[in-house]
């Protein structure tokens, strides 16, 4: 069974994807890491993020085994990922790898922005995980403060909210595979849900669509 999970930044989709993968014993791919790896390589090489050809070249060389989630989860890398992810050539270069992951015998869990719409439209179970921008900003802020990347100030929180809004606008407004709810997806709004409640809702939705 393929489980496709999409949603905006800090909605809780990654946590739900990991939990569902553990529950069903399926491999999991956080596809944001692919775009983050491209963004990170562009920054490291001093290449402009709007150089679509260079970014597509980096994307074509990516190898799933070489991804380092910890190094890729920092704030500047997320913003760079959102910029390079808008280039159609970058998305194209990453499609085969994601589809091959989804097509593993037994299935897989993938989370991102276009899994249910572009990468695995055939997935029987599709979730769209969301939360208010304010709640997502609070979660991201707590995470950054916890990692010592940001001071615990109201200005810090306001800055994170502004970043989240900018990322939402870019990810939803782009022409190539924008973030949107697949017609047959179940939406889970985690604004007022704890992790266990969100997981229970996700499990119910997946069980209802299990082939
Ligand atoms: O989920 P994330 O925050 O790690 O993703 C980082 C960026 O990558 C996100 O802002 C948009 C892009 N992305 C995408 O365009 N398509 C995906 N399937 C996953 C991520």
Image (cartoon, rainbow, N blue to C red):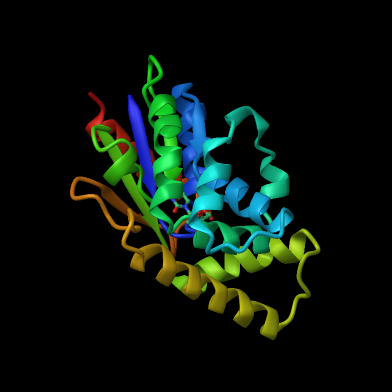
The quadrant of the picture occupied by the C terminus is top left
Horizontal placement of 88 versus 18: left or right?
Answer: left
Tell me: 89 left or right of 134. Answer: left
Q: Position of residue 76 (x, y in %)?
A: 66, 63
Q: Residue furthest top?
A: 105
Q: Position of residue 143 (x, y in %)?
A: 68, 60
List x then y, in percent, for residue 176.
33, 56
Q: Is residue 117 left or right of residue 66?
A: left
Q: Is residue 31 above or below residue 152?
A: above
For image coordinates 73% across by 81% down, the residue present is 153
Residue 198 position in % (x across, y down): 43, 49
The answer to whether one can see residue 10 in this image is no
Q: Nearer the viewer, residue 139 or 106?
A: 106
**What's the residue at 48%, 21% (across, down)?**
25
> What is the residue that sits farthest to the front in this orientation?
53
The residue shown at (49%, 56%) is 52
For residue 173, what is the image quadrant?
Answer: bottom left
Give me the residue at 56% from left, 70% from top: 137
Residue extending farthest to the bottom is 155
Furthest-left residue in view?
A: 183
Is 162 on the left or on the right of 152, as rendered? left
Q: Is residue 95 above or below residue 171?
A: above
Residue 54 visible somewhere in the drawing: yes
* Viewer-closest of 32 and 141: 32
Q: Which corner quadrant of the image does residue 93 belong to?
A: top left
Which residue occupies the foreground of this view, 190 or 18?
A: 18
Task: Identify whether 74 is placed above or below 196.
Answer: below
Answer above or below: position of 71 versus 9. Answer: above
Q: Quadrant of the N terminus?
A: top left
């Amino acid at each position: 069974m393929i489980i496709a999970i999409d949603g905006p930044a800090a909605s809780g989709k990654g946590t739900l994807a990991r939990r569902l993968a553990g529950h069903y014993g399926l491999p999991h791919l956080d596809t944001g890491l692919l775009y983050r790896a491209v963004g990170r390589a562009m920054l490291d090489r001093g290449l402009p993020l709007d150089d679509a050809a260079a970014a597509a070249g980096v994307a074509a060389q990516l190898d799933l085994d070489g991804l380092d989630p910890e190094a890729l989860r920092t704030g500047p890398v997320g913003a760079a990922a959102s910029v390079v992810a808008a280039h159609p050539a970058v998305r194209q270069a990453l499609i085969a790898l994601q589809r091959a992951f989804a097509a593993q015998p037994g299935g897989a869990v993938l989370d991102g922005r276009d899994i249910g719409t572009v990468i695995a439209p055939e997935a029987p179970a599709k979730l769209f995980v969301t939360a208010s921008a304010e709640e997502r900003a609070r979660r991201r802020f707590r995470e950054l403060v916890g990692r010592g990347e940001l001071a615990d100030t109201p200005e810090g929180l306001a800055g994170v909210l502004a970043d989240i809004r900018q990322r939402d606008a870019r990810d939803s407004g782009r022409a190539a595979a924008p973030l949107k709810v697949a017609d047959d997806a179940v939406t889970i709004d985690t604004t007022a849900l704890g992790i266990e409640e969100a997981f229970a809702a996700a499990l119910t939705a997946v069980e209802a669509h299990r082939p």
